[in-house]
Image (cartoon, rainbow, N blue to C red):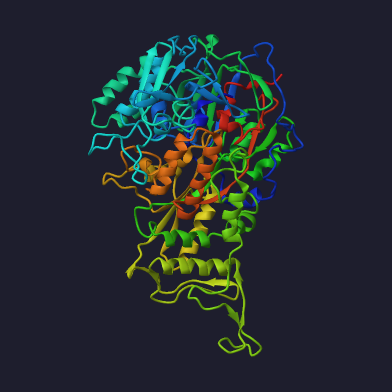
Amino acid sequence: MRTPKLSSPWRLVIAFVVFALVAAACGDDDTGDTTATTAATTTTGGAVTTTTAPPEAFTYRTGIFQDTTTDNFWSYYDPQSTVWNAYVLGATKPALFAINLPGLELDADLAASADPGTAAADGDGFSVTVPMRQDAVWSDGTPITAHDVVFTAQTVKDLGLGGNWISAYQWVSIDEATGEPAVDPASGNPILGLTAVEAVDDYTVKFTWNVLPGLAIWPHGPGLGPIMAEHFWGDIVAEAATSEDPAGALYGASGAGDPSGGPMVFDTREEGAFARTLGNSEANGFAGYYDTGREITSGGVTYTVGPFITDQIYSLYGDQSAAVLALKAGEVDYLYNPLGLQRGLLDQITGDENLTAVVNRTNGFRYLAFNLRNEPMSVQGFRDAVAFMIDKEYVATRVLQNVAFPLYATVPEGNVNWYNAEKADAYQAIYTDLALDTRYDGTPFVTAGADDTLGTADDEPYTATGTEARLHAAVKALLDAGFTYPGTPPDFVSRAIVPAEGGILYNGAPVDSIEILAPGPGYDPLRATYSLIIAQALQDLGFDARALPTDFGVIVDKVFTPTDEGTLDFQMYILGYSLGNPALPTYHEAFWAGKNDTLGPNYGDNATGYNNPEFNALIEEFNQAQTTEDAYDIMWQLEDIFFVDKPFILLFDTGIIEAYRSASINFPFTDTLSGLQFGNGFSGLVTAAS
């Protein structure tokens, strides 16, 4: 499916089922396959579906596990950017270009050609001109033109929109003191950004930057950015611009009646119950999706673009058990979930000939993040100590029993074009191969000799590994950073950690208590479990720490919404990210560039407040890289810095298991990075089973 949503990083809702089911979920440790082999219908990932006649229209019945929160696409793309909103709204907006699935090739959407061209010198800047197709219309029949592109980009600038809008339409930053484009403090070079977006005529749009843009910006910035309908939103935006909070006013507006430029049209949502979209077709009273009937070949699969459905219902279920029962009963065709089906329920799928289960690698990660604005999270030695104390392999294999696999690099292994196994293995080896000859205080590790008494001449030295080495490395990192123990430091005795007694000080002062926000066990037992393990590790080191099970929506609000005092109300939290466009990963800028600080003028997605000048300078180099080879090299330099600085500590990921009712529906392919949900459930491609 061609979906502009692949261009944006999602703030990801990670859903799972009750903690009591973790043991059942751990029964199958096969997470590496991309195709499930079951007693029911199985997928091969290479099937070709060619539609010779329009299939019979039908209602596509789907299940979700978290309520949608908005009908306003502007809001979904920033403060309400949950994956659940993406499932419903993602197939409603066009872009100049799109990424075809499953092959991840760049293709034309509204652009007249699949070739995006390259920016060239133009006066004081660099520009690219894009001819647009002239047959595309909104669902209400209004032509989609260059003026809609200009309107969207200008709204982002004029109203100061943040979040994913910055990734799509990054305008040049102006230094308030000088009135000139802002410069990177590390290099002194101007920070790249748009200086103009113009409609040359009704079907030609021109983008101009102050600095030559690389692949990360063109076409993988505004080229993949969603486009909004000026004739519907123009007056609403104009009114919002007059308010004290223009962005907030726009985000608070109703999206009812917003015309679609995709295969689906938003219809309605009932809080706590369901949402509904309609096929953008003449049969439904709309002008119709301009790409309907187009044949696409991607990744060796050929398919025809729909929509082939009359409507889609997103029914809200309290848990996966209830949803699977609905799937088996024929009440639901497909279940959405960013983490996929819980493994404990897989047997119910594989034993039913009407259902099909598939497994795919994911394009994301689960992580622990720090508020770097506050101590002790701002102290490098503290973050280093936490990293040493988290035994990801032990948690993955012994605690989570192979449901999850440990991560050390942000680039997913499944993204074969961008993954660097040598780098990732080197990161991992720092922890898994850790071996120490001396304790945190510099004295050697010794065991008692023949007289069974320590401290005598026949003591025998040894090399500490595993938990013992991790503990001593963590304590040394803390001591080197200015932490002290007024009582007894932690130790490792009789193959077990002996917690510190008497607490811990930083620069001679007591350390405040630490809360780790994480979804509760009823929402995601994996991350809930991890939060308990991390809290215990901090307690062992002498900190007053506790895991705080918290509703996902509350975590997102605390992490990404400033308080009235202009702060962010968290210390540490555990969440997950889907990484947007796998064809050219650009999330390093969105998540960790200093200019995208959530408390900064861009209101970006960098909630940690991470701001490393070297990292920021490399971001600007990445944005100007003209070849994939150069971008790849710079991206892994960014990974090196990220791994050392640790604004996030990566925890784990899982393969994604999905289930659908193959007796009722067909998908043109199922072997695709992050699964069917990454293409929004293929609303524009799904057909009725023959």
Q: Is 174 displayed left or right of 433 in the figure?
A: left
Q: How many numbered discs, if any?
A: 0
> Would you place residue 571 above or below residue 33 in this image?
below
Q: Residue at x 60, y 60 (%)?
A: 432
Q: Position of residue 548 (x, y in %)?
A: 44, 54
Q: Quadrant of residue 503?
A: bottom left
Q: Position of residue 312 (x, y in %)?
A: 55, 22
Q: Residue at x 47, y 60 (%)?
A: 384
Q: Residue at x 70, y 46 (%)?
A: 30
Q: Is 387 displayed left or right of 345 in the figure?
A: left
Judge by depth and name the residue closer to the eye, 76 or 161: 161
Q: Is residue 212 visible?
A: yes
> Would you place residue 351 above or below residue 111 in this image?
below
Judge by depth and name the residue closer to the eye, 371 or 457: 457
Q: Position of residue 327 (x, y in %)?
A: 64, 32
Q: Position of residue 31 (x, y in %)?
A: 67, 45
Q: Residue at x 67, y 32 (%)?
A: 671
Q: Is residue 610 visible?
A: no
Judge by depth and name the residue closer to the eye, 431 or 289: 431
Judge by depth and name the residue closer to the eye, 286 or 93: 93
Quadrant of the frame with the N terminus: top right
Quadrant of the frame with the C terminus: top right
User: Which residue is outermost to the right?
Assistant: 39
Q: Quadrant of residue 669?
A: top right
